[in-house]
Amino acid sequence: MGRQALLRHQPDLCYFAKDLKGRFIAANAGFVAMIGLKTEGQVLAKTDFQVWPGFLAEQYTKDDAMVIASGAPLVNKVELVLRRDRTASWFATTKAPLRDPGGAIVGIEGLCRHLKKAKEPPEKSLRMPAVIGHIMDNYAGKIDIPALAALEYLSVKQFERRFKQEYGMVPVKYIQRIRLDAARQLLAVTRLPIARIGREAGFYDGSHFSHQFTKYTGLSPKAFREKHLQPPD
């Protein structure tokens, strides 16, 4: 049984594959259910922009392009997804180049795993799971880097070096990305005041929040909401 055939029968894992034009060419039952459809046929030949809200599709296609250009996998990217009722769920996505028998890259394939809802135990398969779990539960408040280092029984310098090796950035930058992703979700699925969204995402200085958000997304919080606010159900 080939890899794709095997993964089609793993409903706890959300498997997908796309061609170089970003069109889905495979999706298992877990992925189909995650995006709210019923059959693989409803997914095939569609792009992210036909499946996800625009702000998510933009990020996913950007990640795809990075994997295709570098030929290197993107491993366990932790992402926060807020539903319309504002319940939070965490997912970890791994993407890798899809190659033909000659080794040429012909697309990407990936696995997406539901990690946890707020306050549930962290996923053990994550690297440094206690640290990531603490960040996911506490991103809206102050996160002390020495306390994170203590969770791994490391000095701050040792911890920062190891964290960067595992996740490609220092802890402070990783925490900021989690906070900005949370703000992005809130702007798209709620009508909360922008200042309050900044606070709920862990930014207590409005100008700093606006500057960092604009740098991260290319749009101010107000412009991002105007472009991506989802209509009510």
Image: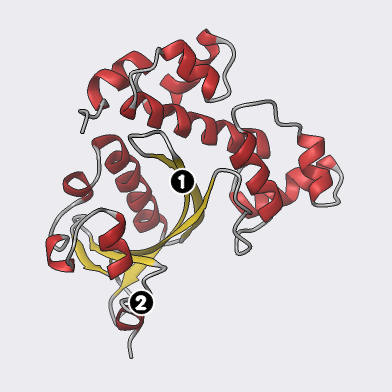
Task: Choose mark 2 or mark 1, whichever is in front.
Answer: 1
Which residue lies under the disc numbered 1? 89
Q: Which mark is residue 7?
A: 2
Number of dots carrying numbers: 2
In the rendered structure, the answer to whether residue 8 lies left or right of residue 126 reads: left
Residue 53 lies in quadrant? top left
- Compared to residue 187, the image places residue 53 above or below, namely below
User: At x 61% / y 39%, what residue is drawn?
Assistant: 137
Kind of element beneath mark 2: helix
Where is residue 18 drawn, in percent x and y? 24, 62
Q: Secondary structure at mark 1?
A: strand
Depth check, front residue: 198 or 172: 198
* Residue 40 falls in image quadrant: bottom left
Give the residue displayed 33% in from the left and 91% down from the top. 1
Q: Confirm whether residue 211 shows in the render.
A: no
Which one is earlier in the sequence, the residue at label 2 or at label 1? 2
Is 110 drawn above or below residue 134 in the view shown?
below
Residue 29 is situated, as x and y percent measured from the top left of the image, at 28, 69
Name which residue lies at 82% across and 40% down. Answer: 156
Q: Quadrant of the C terminus?
A: top left
Question: Is residue 26 rendered to the left or right of residue 99?
Answer: left
Amino acid at dot 2 = Leu
